[in-house]
Image (cartoon, rainbow, N blue to C red):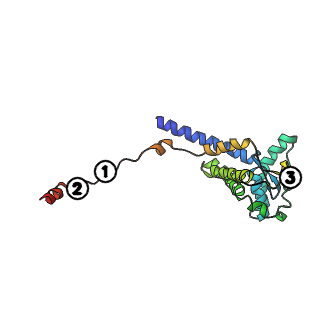
Amino acid sequence: MANQSRGWTSSRISSIASRIFFFIVFLQIPLFRVPCRSGMCTTPVHVTTSQLVASDVFPIAAVKTLLYPGAVAHGLVKNMAIPSWNDLENIYNLTSVKEAPLALDLKRLEVLSGSYFCVAGAIVGLMKPGRMSMFGTLLIVWGLVKEGILSRPVNTDASQGIYVYPTMLLAIVCAFASVKYDIKKALRTPAPRPTAKPLQSSSKSKLK
């Protein structure tokens, strides 16, 4: 009974964490700030959609579907107005991303791939929590650390530099908590294997 209760609690925590992570991603709560093809991106959805529009992988309607929940949330918070569906490309500066240099994406492959994993992990996590969100978050963190700390910044303008918001810590906690951990199974030691012993008859024959 205690094991069932422990397993139910772990499943409940991972389910709640996955839902919180979904809202963090798709309500576009700012987590970081990096230069991207559409200007300055502050969320995994913004990074992902700017690259999708530039590469023509998905139709623009699918891209707007990813952007619209966050656009509505930001519009209600800022001026209590719901933005128009047709204005999303202008709001997120997606009209000229195809002319932007490809080097912006190649320079931040970890942030770009991590954003893809975060967006996909947030959607999949609603149905079945997994490790995709955690992996994507770690990739983004590593990309930000590599560029912001390990490399020398080229741009000295503070408004155009790499920045990590405190909300990134909440996203990391939710990404890790969304993974189901079986601590009892991990700590369980394998049973010792029996060692082969020589037959008594063979040992006696050798003595003779």
Which mark sits nearer the N-terminus, 3 or 2? 3
Q: Among all residues in the image, which is located at the extreme front?
A: 152
Q: Residue at x 72, y 57 (%)?
A: 112
Amino acid type at circle 3 is: Ile
Q: Nearer the viewer, residue 12 or 104?
A: 104
Category of crowding for the residue at label 2, using alpha-carbon neighbours closer than 10 angstroms: few (below 14), some (14–19), many (at least 20): few
Residue 11 appears in the rendering: yes
Q: Is residue 61 above or below residue 184?
A: below
Q: Are the residues flagged by discs 1 and 3 in contact, CB closer than 8 Å? A: no
Residue 65 appears in the rendering: no
Q: Residue at x 52, y 40 (%)?
A: 7
Residue bearing mark 1: 194
Cα distance between the residues tagged 1 and 3: 69 Å
Please name which of the two marks, 3 or 2, marks the residue nearer to the observer.
2
Which mark sits nearer the N-terminus, 1 or 3? 3
The image's mark for residue 91 is 3
Q: Secondary structure at mark 3?
A: helix
Q: Is residue 5 above or below residue 85?
A: above
Category of crowding for the residue at label 1, using alpha-carbon neighbours closer than 10 angstroms: few (below 14), some (14–19), many (at least 20): few
The image's mark for residue 58 is none
Amino acid type at circle 2 is: Pro
Q: Is residue 15 left or right of residue 55?
A: left
Q: Secondary structure at mark 2?
A: loop
